Image (spheres, grey):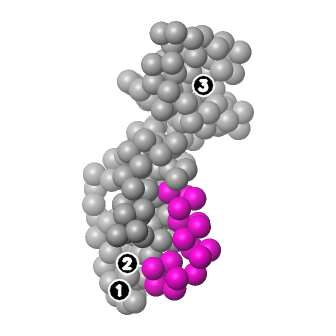
Amino acid sequence: MMPGSDQYYIFDCAARLAENDYSIFEAGGYLERYPFQTFLVLIVYCFQFIFGKHHYLAFQCMNALFLSGIFMLFKKISEEIHSNKINGDVTYITIALFFPLSLYVGFCYGSIPGLFFSALGILCGVKYLNTFENKYAFLSASILAICPYIKNSCLVFFIAYILILFV
């Protein structure tokens, strides 16, 4: 099924870029009006070279892989915080049973990849707070700083991380 709304426009912009049509950047063009979608358009543009022009299913499969990664990352975050494997298993089962999150797999947008990388950044941040190894602080800050380019709302995780470090 072909995506609608913003999803459709993002795939359309990527197709136009592939055809060397840069009108999406001009005044009144989609990316001129919504510049925060540019990174996602570039991701979809790159996907076109691998999977073809209308690759909605490939994007949804990528979302499914990222979703399974989210489950594992939340489990690892829980284990890192509580130092207990049982809590990690309970977290994994609980989040896997949270059905609304699974519905986002069919949504050809940056929500699932953004949450995956945010969870990865949070895991690195929790490891830093447990070990105080600078590599984890750098990894966490780097990952969380890039996440808003995937999905704008991921900026919340970066701000929260900065507040935790300095407050």
Q: Which residues are magenta?
A: 127-144
- Horizontally, residue 89 falls left or right of residue 60, namely left
Image-based side of 150 in relation to 14, left or right: left
- Which percent across, then down, holds residue 158? 43, 56
The residues bearing labels 1 and 2 have C-alpha atoms spaced at a distance of 6 Å
Q: Which mark is residue 78?
A: 2
Q: Main secondary structure of the magenta part?
A: helix
Q: Nearer the viewer, mark 1 or mark 3?
A: 1
Residue displayed at 60% across by 25% down: 14
Disc sitting over residue 70 in the figure: none
Q: Which residue is mark 1?
A: 82
- Report the quarter where the C terminus lies: bottom left
Amino acid under label 2?
Answer: Ser
Amino acid type at image mark 3: Ala
Front in this rendered view, residue 14 or 33: 33
Any part of residue 56 in sight? yes
Q: Is residue 84 left or right of residue 113?
A: left
Residue for point 41% across, 26% down: 6
Q: Residue at x 39, y 56 (%)?
A: 159
Q: CA distance from mark 3 to mark 2?
A: 38 Å
| Vertical arrangement, residue 22 with respect to residue 69, above or below | above
Would residue 70 be counted in the magenta stretch? no
The residue singled out by tag 3 in the image is 14
Residue type marked 1: His
Graded by Cα atoms within 10 Å as few (under 14), some (14 to 19) or many (20 or more), the crowding at tag 1 reads: few
- 75 in relation to 85, above or below: above
Q: Quarter of the image holding residue 160? A: bottom left
